[in-house]
Image: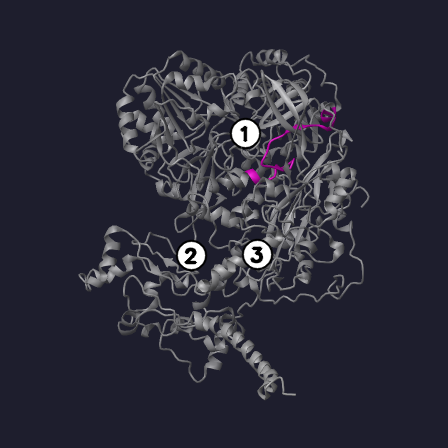
Amino acid sequence: MSTAQPNTYWRSLNELSHNDEYKRFVDREFQANATELTDGYSRRNFLQIMGASIALAGFAACRKPIQKILPYSRQPEFVVAGNPLFYATAIPFRGAVTGLVVQTHEGRPTKVEGNELHPDSLGGTNVLQQATILDLYDPDRSRNILLGGESKTVAEFSAFCAEFFTSGKRVAFLSEATSSQTVSRIRRSLSSRFANSTWVTYEPFGEENALLGTQTVFGSKLRAIPQYDKANVVVSFDNDFMSSGPDSVRAAKLFAKRKKVMSTQDDMNRLYVVESNYSLTGSNAEHRVRVKSSEVAQVAFALAAAVGADGFSGYSNAHSSHDILNQMAADLRAQNGAAVVVAGDDQPVSVHAAVAAINVAIGSVGNGVTYAALPFTDSANQNEAFTKLISDLKAGSYDALVMVGTNPVYTAPADVDVKGALSAVGTVVHLSTHVDETSAALPATGWHVNRAHFLEAWGDGLSYTGAESVIQPLIQPLFGGLSDIEVLNLIATGTFTAGHDLVKTTWGTADWREVLHDGLRKGTSFRAEAARTASGAGQAVRSLADGAASVDGIEIVFKPDSKIYDGRFANNGWLMELPDPITKITWDNVALMSPATAGQFGVEYPRSSILRAPADEEPMVSITSNGNTVELAIWVVPGHADDSITVYTGYGRTHSGRVGSGQGVDVHPLRTSGSPLFTSGTVTKSSNTYSIASTQDHHSMEGRPLIREATLVAYKANPTFAPDLVKVPGPIDDNGQAISLFNEQTFPEREPQWGMTIDLNACTGCGVCTIACQAENNIPVIGKNEVRRGREMHWIRVDRYFSGDVNGNPQIVHQPIPCMHCELAPCEQVCPVAATTHSDDGLNQMTYNRCIGTRYCANNCPFKVRRFNFFNYPKTFLTEGTDPEVVQMAMNPDVTVRFRGVIEKCTYCVQRLSRAKIESKRETNSVKPKDGSVKTACQQACPSDAIYFGDLTDSNSTVVQTKRNERNYLLLEELNIRPRTSYMAKLRNPNEATA
Amino acid sequence: MAQLFPEWSNRVPRLLLVGSVLLITSIVFFFWHFGSHEFLEVGYAPQQPIDYSHRLHAGELGLDCRYCHASVEVSAVASIPSTQTCMNCHTQVLPESDKLALLRESWTEGTAIEWVKVHDLPDYVQFNHSSHVNVGVGCSSCHGRVDRMEVVMQAEPMSMGWCLDCHNNPGPSLRPLDQVTNMSWVAPVNQFELAADIISKKNIAPPIYCNACHY
């Protein structure tokens, strides 16, 4: 255990300092206020209320309420009541679609999975894709076409379109990024019909800078498609490619392939990240360079010079002399092209140009990265086109504005007067799922058209790598919405054509059924361009580099939120309540900064008063830039660049819906079109405070060796470093296991024995397992105040540990924690009513109908994975509000919805196991399903295949192979509770030259 | 001095003792009996929107259960047939019957017929038909002689104890697979051997742990 365990791990600064506040916090099994009913009624009068309701209920409840069964009039093909069906479709996001397979129960989509046939999904999903089911069933979605607030029918809107959009009208189209082939087709007829029209693609955080960067180097806009599976070395300049971007699933899948170290013979890749904010990708890096976001460009130029990129001969700057830079350059050059350098969309054009030049210089074009021309992109700079469009609209250059999606009133930079443009142009059509800020700002002659969710309407699109995919609806529009292609076609032709016909016209009929089955046209992708450096590119890049300026003093960096993005997913409770991968903050945005920067504002860490007792609140800073001031809570992230403050957009919305409106702070007033990525500003300590719900200290396991990691070299020298770290004390029995005081469980041979392994080396910490679990198991959303009390209900949480220098550049390890299904489970010993017991297939089963809510089990659980329903959350969620039936439709019918007063926890997705066992019994007469035929929801969703699950009695199963792996270890093994979930230790592959 | 209490008052303590024992017993009995599934559930036969007679269709006409309850062998639910299934015959048989007006309305209008659920388990119970009928548990074992019912009635208590009776000792309820839908099947004299044979052939070991049904 010598080299293996050099680190102490800590989750928060308070834990690191082990101050009194932290001790008091973890001394209690449940944190203060978690176990008290402080809302409105006390425990005592709660019992009185209960008594009264029982008396009132009387004997009326002796007979169950009458339930109806409503069979079909005409039986649809393939539908078998009780058995779900799966259809291929694709989810559009920021101009790329990702293939999905969606589960439906009797025509009701309930769960999203990745499409294994789709090259951009490969079976995985990200958090946005998993949570889209809740967007579909959002009762706050707009239900009508509105003209000046008056609701109108589709026929009236069609009549308006036919009458108004006559040939020759000057129409401006403002669209979110789309790769739809049908939209491209309709655009051609739009531009011929409306000669003086314009089409602008607007994304607040789009890939325009990246495309302009490649345009500088290659002479045309090309998309960089990194091939992470072919790259031994990856360098990321502020590119959080593992988080929720349009390419994140494919990136995580391919990247994880190179992190699968199954024996000491295997090698793994190496990741360098240059960034200011501690991003998810940064937390998975071997080497992380912490610089201000506005200085990332300088590092990129220095690297370009170090690898000898075209145009950078003789270039040097302050970063050129750093050791890490030269080692990075040497490492890149040594790979013969099996390396890739990527840059984030939130970096300026110059960085993307430099990165393209570096990729050419190290010979990775066609190997570690390919470049592809996009058939749907306009050659003009769309960021400039957007500001020009708004001023043209104000000047009256257009007769009408058509907005396809987008919410520019909320997302546009503060100096762009979108509201003024809307009232100037008068005739506006805004297609939107919600009556959002833009819809609310429409003039009296403005049409709001309620937009169909992608699971309700036909569509198509190209994936990030160019696979031609079709978006197949799974349900009729719940609120009668129209899709973007239907509206555009209506404007182009004056007549309404159904989306299905529009898509089919584009696609032809030859292979239609096959396309629908697969979700894509097989074998299609963008053609890899030769990507030759254009003449004079070197000078062009160099002049960009010479002109680049960084922000002096404190910089303010704008980033899209990893969960709700630019605010478009703000009304999704699952996403809002998902802890941020790094800060573990829910429901809010904050001002992220390093400990040193916080010190400038007189905020010392560790603070004496911290967190989670409701009275304790975070100090705030007020940030002034662009003449506007916003106040945000200070949140210290060790490893954040100094003199830099990162703020997430998407919060502080006013017209989002019941979930998103008023959550957090809108930071758009600070953003200008001149500096949309980072800006300078004056920052002062505010006298106000703000309460934050962060889960980072919740469910602490208090400094035991839970995380085990080593370098690749150390692992090869001592492969069993992880299991060797802890020995179970006491004598050993005949089976080689430590003896136990308790009765051993006996498991019958005919039953499968379920087990799980989580590979910490592959896990990126993205949190998709949490959302997938929430969707599969009907887990409620409880709100910010309840999270502050430590009552969050997630069955699988992702613990994030820091290690290293708190003021320098600490490392991060992520560890997903579901129920361990201990064979000698401590929870089972203390349940007074035997509501938690063991099943024959080795599950620690939770029987809700037996549970009386003593919470002894949660007390006694060493992993803190048991969750208690303090209130009847599903009742609030499912039976109240204007349209409870809509939310009910999102529920998985195979899983019981839990009532107040019962404990719940991870079941290894027993509903899936049960279904698989019954099917296996029917087909093979054995209740042991074939290996790989049953997956838990977290395992299936994971884009990096970090979770293995299967039958431990099948010695050939994948999970048994992982359990035999040298890196496999058990959490709290010394307690001899024999968890069925184990972990494979984390490895890092640092560049030895840096040592 | 006259006696303060009459003579019969000597019997009061005894009567009180006996009386309270009787009272407590009767309260227990009251809940035990009137709260039981046998009392509350068995015999439940709600009025259905159409006077559909199982006695006629399954009994006299001899339709197989699976003609209508088609998914029973492949799904958790046996399923109530679509209107289409009824209309397979009723476009020819009694096409003008007044009793079938609702059926024809459902067929032409596409509306659903709102059948009342008779066998209604609590929501926390996950019962699977296919896992039972595919190993030789007959329809009539749980649903009784449906072929003799004019209106469908719950024949068994369907309580957890009743489920476990069979899960602990499946033998008496098993029959050859080709007899599963046979309403009039009676256990032969060699049921014990027959059941042992089915149990070994079909690898039957009914689960009795919680997660088998509750999740």
**What chain does mark 2 sit on?**
A
What is the number of the mark on residue A48?
A: 3
Q: Kindly report which numbered mark, 1 or 3, lies closer to the viewer in this rendering.
A: 3
Where is residue A216? Give x, y as percent: 54, 16
Q: Earlier in the sequence, mark 1 or mark 3?
A: 3
Give amino acid for label 2.
Answer: Gly
Q: Earlier in the sequence, mark 3 or mark 2?
A: 3
Same chain, marks 3 and 2? yes
C-alpha separation, residue under disc 1 versus residue under disc 2:
42 Å
Task: Please provide the residue range marked out in magenta.
Answer: A576-599
C-alpha separation, residue under disc 3 versus residue under disc 2:
41 Å
> In the image, is residue A579 part of the stretch drawn in magenta?
yes
Q: Is residue A197 left or right of residue A804?
A: left
Where is residue A840? Give x, y as percent: 60, 64
Residue in view at x 74 percent, y 21 percent: A322
Give amino acid for label 1.
Answer: Gly
Q: Residues within 10 Å of mark 3 (few under 14, many from 20)?
A: few
C-alpha separation, residue under disc 1 versus residue under disc 3:
40 Å
- Tell me the quadrant of the picture where the N terminus of chain B can be found: bottom right
* Secondary structure beneath label 3: helix
B125 up-or-down from A611: above or below: below
What is the number of the mark on residue A82?
A: 2
Residue in view at x 46 percent, y 46 percent: A880
Residue position for label 1: A652
Q: Nearer the viewer, residue A454 or A446?
A: A446
* Secondary structure beneath label 2: loop
Q: Are marks 3 and 2 in contact (CB under 8 Å)?
A: no
**What chain does mark 3 sit on?**
A
Give amino acid for label 3.
Answer: Gln
